[in-house]
Structures are given as structure tokens and as C-alpha cells.
Image (cartoon, helix red, strand yellow):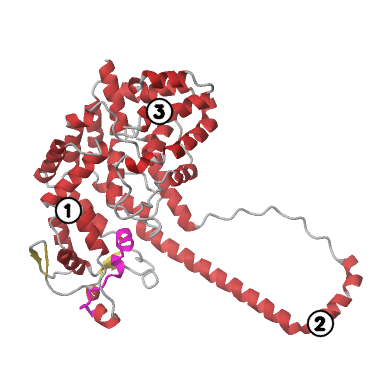
Amino acid sequence: MARDMKAAALALHRFGLGPRAGSIEAIQSDPQGALIAELDSPGAGLVAAATLPSSGAANRAVFEYNAERNAKDKLARRGREAAQKMAENTGMENAAKENAGTENTMAAQPEAPPATAAQPEPVPLPRRIFLDEAKARFDHAIRAELGFVERLMWFWSNHFCVNADATVMAGGYEREAIRPYVLGRFADMLQAAEGHPAMLLYLNNALSIGPNSVAGINRDRGLNENLAREILELHTLGVRTVYSQTDVISFAKILTGWTIRETVSDPDHGGEFVFLRRAHEPGSQTVIGRDYPDNGVEQGRAVLADLARHPATARNIATKLARHFVADEPPPALVDRLASRFLDTDGDLKEVARVLVAAPEAWATEQAKIKRPGEWVVAALRAAGQNGEIGRIVGGLNLLGEPLWRPPSPKGFPDDNAAWLAGLAQRLDIANTFAQRTADRLDPPAITEAAIGPLASPETRRAIASAESKPQALTMLLMAPEFLRR
């Protein structure tokens, strides 16, 4: 029984988003089966989004918001300039007359109205959209039964990352291009991600024009290789594998014309994907030894379909999954099995996830991986039974070095322990602040049992039991190795 409890706790930390009250007991009879069952649950990976705008709608709304704000600023500036000009035109003579009569009119002046409290500045629309998307994401994670599918979604969102500094569509992109395909075929997710307006903006393909296309000749504009390079290097084949710089250039030419409708000229569909034939480099291209005829947008889709099925892609994905869930140095045998299943099932990501859960290497008792900041924050809220306030969650992630939808590069956030060790001191500060705010309403010993009980070492138990206060006990739990690691 103790062994089953330990395996259940390990499953929730390693594969999920941390235990909630009663969740260890709920899956102790079959932890592996519980994880598999979550993969098969209806609607797994999807998030309630009835009130959230589509990416295109968000883009159009922000465009109109910025246009209106610019117009208001321009009118205000015109008003100030007109007032200044009028004052200058009145001349010194009128000013002197007004000054001379000041003493006679002071008594007749009405009292000034009482000062009113300053109204808070409204949250700008781009920030509101960001926070609404963030809240939907973290509400879903905190309420998830186990969190395995959500962890998979976070993994793939980081693999195909975009940046909220580059586009207001980051949250919509995750809902539209990642979530629907987390348990589907990799080829479908690849197509959805690379053709999404958020990705085209982030990696500059929206401005890439074929040098010999009609638009390229007329506008003296040219190629941008960013999207093509990152697809080959990061999203599919892996760094320094089977492609060359020539392949990058050829693929970049194929992707010309993959762009976005301009909102200024298309207010109903601005911000949505469009293939612009006049910007597309004409002619067939060769990528990794295969010729692709010029059949418009299908030329690029054909390359993506082949990349999704390439053995190098299977190995790259398998290595990243094993590194994320198991160890910084992924067990070679596990990588081989994951890659083989990827190829045998035509990139069926649910089947690959099943292999991961069934792998003996994934159930090693050592908690070898440090939770990334987002995982740790959500695990703390789940353990404490708190919903969390989205402003605090986002601010905390900024302090911990994992700002939401703002990766440091197209590689995404790193997935090795060394990248997160330096931030443990900041975690202590955040854990202490969280504990000071919530611990008096909680029972730290009960939370300890619910969150890490079967995993807790004697040293951890003694440290928590000897705490001088509830906040100190909760802080020690959140900073315990068994809680920090998975």
C-alpha cells in the first residue's frame, strides 16, 4: 500500500501538476492507469473559451483600439496647440487688462468644486486580452484532475513557442494551434502552428517576399529565413541534422506568400492567414533531396507533411519529451522507444504519451527534475486549495524568469535543471509571501500529507514539524526538495 501511495504521489508530481487534497488516495490503486484514462477523457486538452476572442478578432480589436487612441491623442494635441496659439494672439495688452481687474473680481469668484478622487486608469485592451487568456489557462491547470494532458499542452506550447511581445494573439494561438492537437497527430499540429498568424508574425514570415515574385520585383523586398530555419532546426528535424543552409533558403522561398490579411484594408478578416500568390517565389524547390513543384500554398504544406514524418523529427521529439518528463540526460532506450512509436503511428501523440507513461525509466523513485516556475506555482495553488489571482500569478512568473508567453528565444524556455537553479532564492521569497497571506486559513500539516506525504523524507518532516508558525511551515513545504522536484 505504501508503495502504491508513493507511486501515486510521484505520478502527480512527475506527469501532472501536483496533488490536490485527496488526489493521491484517488489514484493509488492504479497511478499509471489514471494517467492513461486522462488521455482518453472527452475534450482532454481543450479549455473553456466561450468569452475569449479568436486570434483574428483579438488582432482586429487591438488595431481599432490603437487607432481610436491615436485619434484621441491627435485631437488632444490639436486642442493644446490651438489654445496655445489663441493665448499668443490675445497679446500682452489683454493680459494686462485682465490682471488689473483681478483684485475687483476675486470676491465674486465662486468657490472651487471639491476635488474628486482620481479615477483609476482603465486597463489597456491588449493587457486585458492577455490577462483573460492567462486566467483561462491557469484556471484550467489549477482545476485539472491530474494535469497530465495540461503538462503535455505546456510542453508543446513551449516547443512551438511564440512571443506575446510580438503579437496580441499568443493566448489565442495556444488555444487554436496547440490545444486541439495535443493528443492528435504531430503533422496536424505542425501545420496549424506554422500557418498561424502569431507564428508568422513572431518569426517574420509575414514580411517575407520571394525576390523573383511580382511583389518582390515591384517593391525591391526579399526573403526572410527565420521561419524556415526554426521549423527545421527547432520544430522538426533538430539542430545540425540532415538539412543544409541551401535547404533553409529553398524552404524559405516555399514559405513566401504565407502572410496575414491587413486589418487596415480588410476590417472583417484582418489578422487572419492568407496566401498571397504575388509574394510567392515562383518555381519548384528542392528541400532535403526532394523536389516540390510550385502549387501555391500546397507547396509549403507538402514540405511540412514530409518533415513531420522524418526519422530525425521523431528522434528530436522523443529526446525532448524524455528530457522534459524524465531526466536532463534522457535514457537512450526510452528515446528509442518513443521515436519508434512516433514513426509507427504516423506521429500519433497520444500513443507516444502512452509509451512515456508505460516506460520503467519514467517511474524512477529519484525526483531528478526541478519543476519549472509555472509548474511550481500551480502545484502550490493546487496543494493549498487556492484559485490564485491572475495578476499575482503572472507577476510571480515574471520574477521567476518564466514570463508567460515571453520565451527568451524561439527555442522556448530551457528544460534542464541548470537553467532554474539560480531562481530558487526568488522562489523562497514568493513562497514566504504566499504563506504569509494564506497560511493562517490553512492546515500546513494536512497540506503536507496531501501534497508530498508518501514522498517526504524524515528530514523534511522534521523541518516542517518544528516550524515556529503556520506560514513558516507552509514555506518549508513549498521549498522542500520533494515539492520543488518531480
Report x, y in % for residue 206: 30, 67
Q: Image quadrant of residue 477?
A: top left
Residue at the image point whose x is 25% and y is 28% from the top:
34
Indicate which disc, 1 or 3, sits on the residue closer to the N terminus.
Answer: 1
* Farthest-out residue, top: 1
* Left or right: 308 in relation to 42: left
- Where disc 2 sits, the SS reads helix
Left/right placement of residue 81 relative to residue 449 reads right
Which residue does the numbered mark 3 point to in the structure image? 480
Pointers 1 and 3 in contact (CB under 8 A)?
A: no
**Local SS, label 1:** loop
Q: Is residue 138 left or right of residue 411?
A: right
The residue wearing badge 1 is 237
Question: What is the three-letter code of the residue carrying label 1?
Answer: Leu
Q: Mark 1 against mark 3, which lies toward the viewer?
A: 3
Extent of the magenta region: 198-214
Dot 3 lies on which element?
loop
Residue 204 visible in image: yes
User: Residue 200 lies in magenta, yes or no?
Assistant: yes
Badge 1 crowding class, 10 Å Cα cut-off, few under 14, some 14 to 19, many 20 or more, is many
Residue type for callout 2 = Asn
- Around disc 3, counting alpha carbons within 10 Å, would you say few (fewer than 14), some (14 to 19), or many (20 or more)? some
List x then y, in percent, for residue 448.
41, 23
Q: Which mark is residue 94?
A: 2
Residue at image position (26%, 78%) is 215
Residue 198, x across and y down, in percent:
33, 59
Inspect the magenta stretch and tell me whether residue 143 lies in it: no
